[in-house]
Amino acid sequence: MVMSKPVKTNRKSARSLTAAERQALYRLRHLASGESVEVRAVLPRAFGDKLDRLLAHHDTSKRAFLMQLIEDADRRTLRRLKGAARRHYENGGN
């Protein structure tokens, strides 16, 4: 009897992906396009606890919370800058 080789398909294997594998695929999809950047930080415990408390209070994710903080800070900064200082800021300090 002749055994044939298994045919490879594009279907997902029977095994579920691990969290690390899913995260790696997520990073590949979102970082490869250049549309996203990865931000990592190690905070002192007290700040981590404050962050967790804020996230629970606002019922949001770290990602959404950080995006909102950055948006608010950028808007406040732009409101107070005028002329050459504003152009310098808008050009990324260049």
Image: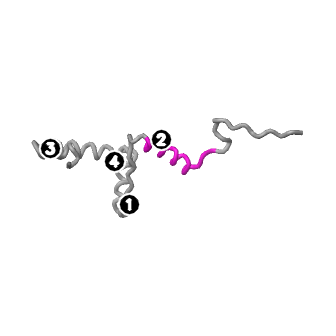
Q: In the displayed structure, does residue 17 sit left or right of residue 57?
A: right
Q: Amino acid at mark 3?
A: Arg
CA gap, disc 3 and disc 4: 23 Å
Give the CA separation, mark 2 to mark 3.
34 Å
Question: Relative to 2, is 50 above or below?
Answer: below
Of labels 2 and 1, the one closer to you: 2
Residue 66 - label:
4
Q: Are marks 3 and 4 in contact (CB under 8 Å)?
A: no
Numbered label attached to residue 42: 1
The numbered mark at residue 86 is 3
Q: Is residue 21 located in the magenta-colored stretch of the structure?
A: yes
Kindly identify the residue that appears in the image at 21 percent across and 42 percent down: 75
Instruction: Name the image quarter holding the N terminus.
Output: top right
> What residue is disc 2 on?
29
Which disc is residue 2 wearing? none
> For numbered disc 2, what is the local secondary structure?
helix
Identified by mark 1, the residue type is Val
